[in-house]
Amino acid sequence: MRIITICFLLLLISGSLVGQDSNVYDNKGKLMIDTTYVIAIDRLEDFRIIEEYAFPSIYNLIDYPRLASENGILGHVIVKIKLESNNIINFSIVKSDHSDLNKSVNFAINKSIREFQYLTKDMKMPFEFYIPIKFEIIKDTFKKDMVKNNAITIKASSETLEKEFIKE
């Protein structure tokens, strides 16, 4: 009975991994937060590599713009990335809920270009995809954390730090 249960769990897990190639695209290549943006289905595996290794770096490079956070501005920014042969990378913001959010996104994508070049060196070109970025204001836990820890508490996400791409 135990072996059957383990086999069933493995099949269930592997089936869910095959059915969901990306956290931001569905299995038809549509961007989940805005289905008007689509990539070719046969490029989902390539995009999964970018999602796995470049997204954490982009995440760590984006700062919430001070004026935007002070004024309660939140929303989405969608960036179109087009990779051409010869390491030419073009990107543009194709949708933004507020222009104050764009500068941080532009900075992060510019800083991540070398990672895109390295990650995609063996991929078929051209390759075009979209990166969704959500700006959200969360409740500040500074005072609660200070009372709890009796110190100023600095937080980091170990998951995104572990996956940050190591450059050669």
Image (tube, helix red, strand yellow):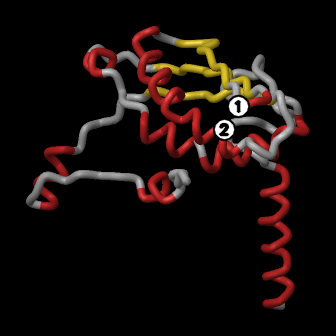
Q: From the viewer's perspective, is residue 107 above or below residue 114?
A: above
Q: Amino acid at mark 1?
A: Asn
Residue lying at 9% horizontally and 60% vertically, measured from the top left: 150
Q: Residue furthest right?
A: 42
Label 1: few (<14), some (14–19) or many (≥20) C-alpha neighbours in 10 Å: some
x then y, percent, for residue 137: 36, 29
Quadrant for the C terminus in the image:
bottom right
Q: Amino acid at mark 2?
A: Gln
In the picture of the structure, the residue carrying the numbered disc 2 is 117
Label 2: few (<14), some (14–19) or many (≥20) C-alpha neighbours in 10 Å: some
Which numbered tag is attached to residue 121? none
Label 1: element kind: helix
Viewer-proximal residue, 6 or 35?
A: 35
Viewer-proximal residue, 24 or 119?
A: 119
User: Residues at badges 2 and 1 in contact (C-beta under 8 Å)?
Assistant: yes
Residue lying at 74% horizontally and 35% vertically, measured from the top left: 25
Residue lying at 76% horizontally and 20% vertically, measured from the top left: 37
x then y, percent, for residue 31: 73, 28
Q: From the viewer's perspective, is residue 151 above or below residue 127?
A: below
In the picture of the structure, the residue carrying the numbered disc 1 is 87
Label 2: element kind: helix
x then y, percent, for residue 116: 64, 38
x then y, percent, for residue 89: 67, 25
Q: Earlier in the sequence, mark 2 or mark 1?
A: 1
Q: CA distance from mark 2 to mark 1?
A: 6 Å
Residue lying at 75% horizontally and 40% vertically, measured from the top left: 47
Quadrant for the N terminus in the image:
bottom right
Q: From the viewer's perspective, is residue 12 above or below residue 22?
A: below
